[in-house]
Structures are given as C-alpha cells and as structure tokens.
Image (tube, rainbow, N blue to C red):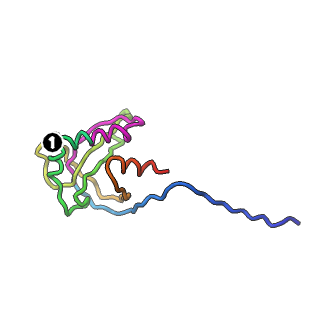
C-alpha cells in the first residue's frame, strides 16, 4: 500500500482591519458637494485636495458651526460618496458633511437625509488625509 499523505496549508499576508457592523437610524446632513470623475487618482489626490481647500476656507468654519455633539455621527465630519448618480457613470458626487437638524443659511450647502441602514465602521487613527488613505491600501 501507499504511505499516508498529510497536507498542511498555510496562508500568510495581509492585515486585519479593525471594524464593526452597526445599525444607524436615519439622520440629516448639511453638505458641501463636489463632482469628481472616476479617475485612478481621485481618492489619493483629488479628494484630499478638496478637503485641504475646504479646511483653508471660510466654508469649513461655516460647515462645522452646524455640528451637534449628541447625534448619530457623534459630531463627526463625514465624507460621503454618491456613486450611482451620473448617467454617463464616469462621474460621482462627493460631500463633506455634518449631521444637523438645521436648514443651511448658505446656498452652497445641500441638506439631505441619510436613511437608516447597516454601517461598516472602520477604526482609523492618525493625521488626515493619510490615515484614511493608508487604511484602504494596507497589504
């Protein structure tokens, strides 16, 4: 007869992402919208440039003036992708947003509702924008 064959398989590599899945109720946001093309560098260059320009403008101070502490988003500033809006499918809307129950006083801001849903919450620490970009490119 034949000798017994034993196989041992080991897969190594990659990093474990620290995340949790949570249910969040509906909430409203005030947001500054910018449309982007779906280029390779949009998340590495264009969106960080959008945030940097926003941080250096009076619109940022106005946006954060709407922040409320005891909210679904705990007073955080959100980056929201709206991927399925363009008819040519090469563009998408991106929003810098804060949760609020107020109406915007400036017509540059948009008010809309985020429906209740399950969220994947990823732990991300460090200086922005590099920390969030590095989170998604971990190998």
95 or 134: nearer the viewer:
134
What residue is at 69 percent from the left and 62 percent from the top? 8
Query: Disc 1 marks which residue?
Result: 58
Q: Where is residue 6 in the image (x, y as percent from the top left)?
A: 74, 65
Report the side of 12 relative to 31 (left or right).
right
Query: Residue placed farthest to the top in the image?
Result: 88
What residue is at 27 percent from the left and 44 percent from the top? 95
Q: Position of residue 125 (x, y in %)?
A: 35, 56
What residue is at 27 percent from the left and 61 percent from the top? 25
- Magenta-drawn stretch contains 36: yes
What residue is at 13 percent from the left and 47 percent from the top? 104
Q: Where is residue 51 in the image (x, y as percent from the top left)?
A: 27, 43
Give, as a single range, the part of the protein colored magenta: 28-51
Q: Residues within 10 Å of mark 1 (few under 14, many from 20)?
A: few
Seen in the picture, residue 123 relative to 35 is either above or below; the reply is below
Query: Residue placed farthest to the left in the image?
Result: 105
Seen in the picture, residue 68 relative to 81 is either above or below; the reply is below
Quadrant of residue 82 in the image?
top left
Quadrant placement of the N terminus: bottom right
Seen in the picture, residue 99 relative to 58 is either above or below; the reply is below
Query: Residue placed farthest to the front in the image?
Result: 127
Q: Position of residue 124 (x, y in %)?
A: 36, 56
28 or 7: nearer the viewer:
7
Report the side of 117 relative to 136 (left or right).
left
Element assignment for label 1: helix
19 or 106: nearer the viewer:
19
- Magenta-drawn stretch contains 59: no
């Amino acid at each position: 007869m034949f000798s017994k064959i034993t196989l041992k398989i080991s897969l190594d590599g990659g990093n474990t992402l620290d995340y949790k899945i949570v249910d969040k109720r509906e909430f409203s946001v005030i947001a500054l919208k910018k449309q982007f093309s779906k280029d390779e560098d949009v998340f590495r260059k264009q969106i960080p440039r959008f945030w940097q320009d926003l941080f250096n403008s009076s619109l940022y101070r106005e946006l954060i003036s709407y922040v409320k502490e005891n909210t679904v988003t705990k007073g955080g500033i959100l980056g929201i992708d709206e991927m399925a809006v363009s008819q040519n499918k090469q563009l998408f809307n991106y929003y810098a947003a804060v949760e609020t129950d107020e109406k915007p006083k400036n017509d540059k801001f948009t008010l809309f509702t985020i429906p209740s849903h399950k969220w994947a919450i990823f732990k991300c620490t460090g200086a922005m924008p590099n920390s969030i970009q590095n989170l998604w490119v971990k190998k």
